[in-house]
Amino acid sequence: MVITVKLFGHLREYLPGKKMLCRAETAEGSTVGDVLDDFGVPHDKPRVILVNSARARLDHVLSDGDVVAAFQVLAGG
């Protein structure tokens, strides 16, 4: 199946060419965690994950055409 992966901020360094978005093929039954592992995104990087604009966890099972977005967590005051 084909999905779109969008990584923002410092997470972009894990996509080919450090671009913000990439279309990727993944196996049926793959989870968000599997896809982030495929791109080498470390599990210890704080992030917010969305699938099709809805908050998701690493164990969320993906479907063909899904859009996975990950944002680095920002802090400030």
Image (tube, grey):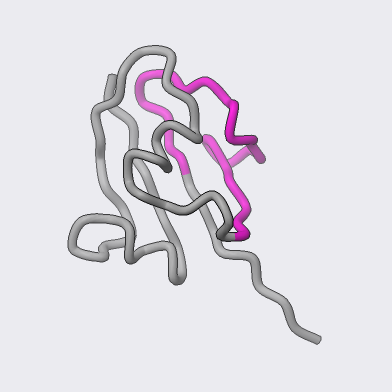
Q: Residue furthest left?
A: 17
Residue 43 to residue 26: above or below: below
Q: Residue at x 20, y 56 (%)?
A: 16
Q: Position of residue 9 (x, y in %)?
A: 46, 70
Q: Residue at x 43, y 31 (%)?
A: 34
Viewer-proximal residue, 7 or 54?
7
In terms of secondary structure, what is the magenta stretch mainly? loop
Quadrant of the snapshot with the C terminus: bottom right
Among the 4 quarters of the image, the one containing residue 14: bottom left
Residue 61 to residue 49: above or below: above
Q: Position of residue 4 (x, y in %)?
A: 34, 39
Q: Position of residue 53 (x, y in %)?
A: 57, 41
Q: Residue furthest bottom?
A: 77
Q: Residue at x 75, y 83 (%)?
A: 76
Viewer-proximal residue, 63 or 73?
73
Residue 15 to residue 55: above or below: below
- 65 within the magenta span: yes
Which residues, given as a range, are shown in magenta?
Answer: 46-68
Q: Residue at x 42, y 29 (%)?
A: 66
Q: Position of residue 7 (x, y in %)?
A: 42, 56
| Left or right: where 69 falls relative to 16 | right
